[in-house]
Amino acid sequence: MARYHGITDKTYKNFVIDAGAVYLNYGEDDERLIGATRDGNTFTIEQEIREIPVDGQKGPVKGLRRVTRVTARITANFVEFTTDVLKLALPGATVEDYPEVEPTHDEIKRALQIALGDYHKNIVIVGNKSGTNEPIICGIKNALADGNFEISESDGEEATISIQFTAHFDPENLDEEPWFIRNPKEEVDA
C-alpha cells in the first residue's frame, strides 16, 4: 500500500526553529535587540475577507472576494526587565530619576497622550531557518504596544511581561499593509 505524505528531499531545509529574537527598528540606524524572551513569540496577521454577494451565485465565486481589514501583531514574552522594556510596553511613558537626589530607581510614569513619536518604525522577530545561514524575518511597521500591561509572577519562577505590538497603516499610503515577511531564497544544490 502506498503512503502519502508531503516530505521531499528539501523538507529539512524549510523548518523555522527556536524562538528567535525580537528587535526594535530592525535594519535602521537605531536598531536594537529588545531583550531575552521565554515561551516563544508570535507573529499574527488577522484578516477579514469579504465575499461580495451577487444575485444568481450558488456559492463563493472566484474574483468576488476582497480584503476589508488587516491587523498585524507581534506578541513577545520578555523575561528581561529593563527600563527600556517597561517603557516600550507603555506608549507615552517617561522615565525620571527617583528620588531626584541620589536616585536609586528609574520611575516610569505616563500621561494619557500617545504621540506620533511613540510609534516605532518596526518590530520584528528574526528566526532561524534550517538549510540556510539567512534568517527568516517577520515584522510589523509603525508598531505600538497596545495590549494590557501585566507582569506575571509566581513562586519558584522568573517573572515575564507579555507585550503585544500592533502594526499601524501609514496615513500617506493606506493601500500598503503594514507588515512584511522576508523568507530566505532557496539555495540551489551544487
Image (cartoon, helix red, strand yellow):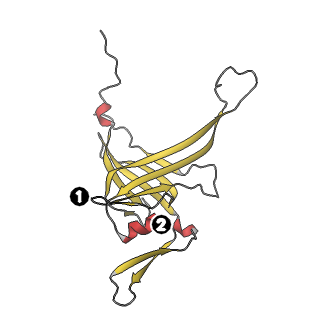
Q: Is residue 49 left or right of residue 107?
A: right
Within 10 Å of disc 2 (Cα), the crowding (few <14, some 14-19, many 20+) is many
Q: Are marks 2 and 1 in contact (CB under 8 Å)?
A: no
Tell me which amino acid carries mark 2.
Leu
Q: Secondary structure at mark 1?
A: loop
Query: Going by the picture, which residue comes out furthest to the top?
Result: 1
Q: Secondary structure at mark 2?
A: loop
Cα–Cα gap, marks 2 and 1: 27 Å
Q: How many marks?
A: 2
Q: Nearer the viewer, residue 81 or 71?
A: 81
Mark 1 lies on residue: 156
**Mark 2 vs 1, N-terminal side:** 2
Mark 2 lies on residue: 90
- Occupied quadrant, residue 32: bottom left
Tell me which amino acid carries mark 1.
Gly
Q: Position of residue 74 (x, y in %)?
A: 45, 52
Which residue lies at the image location 34% right of the left edge and 36% below the top edge?
Answer: 14
Q: Position of residue 93 (x, y in %)?
A: 49, 72
Query: Going by the picture, which residue comes out furthest to the right?
Result: 55
Q: Quadrant of the N terminus?
A: top left
**104 shown above or below 134:** below
Q: Is residue 99 left or right of residue 60?
A: left
- Occupied quadrant, residue 105: bottom left
- Tell me the tag on residue 185: none
Query: Going by the picture, which residue comes out furthest to the left?
Result: 156
Q: Position of residue 168 (x, y in %)?
A: 56, 56
Which residue lies at the image location 56% right of the left edge and 42% below the top edge?
Answer: 47
Which residue lies at the image location 64% right of the left edge and 58% below the top edge?
Answer: 171
Q: Is residue 7 left or right of residue 54?
A: left
